[in-house]
Image (cartoon, rainbow, N blue to C red):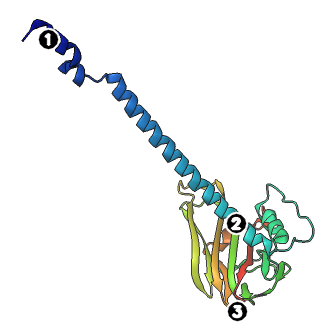
Amino acid sequence: MDPGLRQALSRVAPSQDTAMHVPGGSVASHLGTTSRSYFYFTTATLALCLVFAVATIMVLVVQKTDSIPNPPGKFPLKGGNCSEDILCILEKAPFKKSWAYLQVSKHINKTKLSWNKDGIVHGVRYQDGNLVIQFPGWYFIICQLQFLVKCPEHSVDLKLELLINKDVKKQTLVTVCESGAQTKNIYQNLSQFLLEHLQVNSTISVKVDKFQYVDTNTFPLENVLSIFLYSGSD
């Protein structure tokens, strides 16, 4: 081939090395751009899901509160006292049809606890340690008890049981005095709550195995049983 023609062709056709060479920086840049795009897409998707979830919750809250009239009076919460806070919440709450707030009797002589009859009872009946339901529906039940144990030479099991129609529906168990220190005083709080659908004449009661340890002197206002009708069936 003529030398001049060969030189001209070599100028027009790129070499094999030039055609196959791709700079490493270009590949890394392309991969980095793809990763960032995927990250931004994922972040945007999660943000939209979060906004949708919050919006759904707000709609449910508005639907629940729109049908509830403003409660009369103002009842500021009293910090530092759980039972008083519960009472204040119940007094301020819009569900007034059926609720109760009782403090435990000072004279406890059996595992089934009795409650002071001068407690607040509205739309529900108290009889022989039982709260008797008068309106069907979903009830929220709360019980809180304080115990004072002067440790004997053995461990002590404290158990609180919530009963519906004499059947145990919820219970809490804790063991204290495991070290066997005889002079050590143990203050123990037990609490339990339950959401249960109840019919008319259903009964609610509380049992404690070691009733002699229920402290009615140090914290007499901290031993309470409270219920309220959350959603009626009628």
Dot 1: what SS? Answer: helix
Query: Residue at position x 93%, y 68% from top?
Result: 73
What amino acid is found at the position of numbered circle 3 in the picture?
A: Val
Q: Which residue is mark 1?
A: 5
Mark 1 against mark 2, which lies toward the viewer?
1
Mark closer to the chain start, 1 or 2: 1
- What's the distance in space between the residues labelled 1 and 2, CA to CA? 81 Å
Query: Residue at position x 31%, y 23% from top?
Result: 24
Local crowd size for mark 1, using a 10 Å CA cut-off: few (<14), some (14–19), many (≥20): few
What amino acid is found at the position of numbered circle 2 in the picture?
A: Val
Which residue sits furthest bottom? 201
- Res. 200 mark: 3
Local crowd size for mark 2, using a 10 Å CA cut-off: few (<14), some (14–19), many (≥20): few
Dot 2: what SS? Answer: helix
- Res. 59 mark: 2
Query: Residue at position x 81%, y 82% from top?
Result: 97
Marks 1 and 2: CB-CB under 8 Å? no
Can residue 224 be seen from the camera position used here?
no
Mark 1 against mark 3, which lies toward the viewer?
1
Of the pair 108 and 49, the residue shown nearer to us:
49
Q: Hey, which quadrant is residue 130 in on the image?
A: bottom right
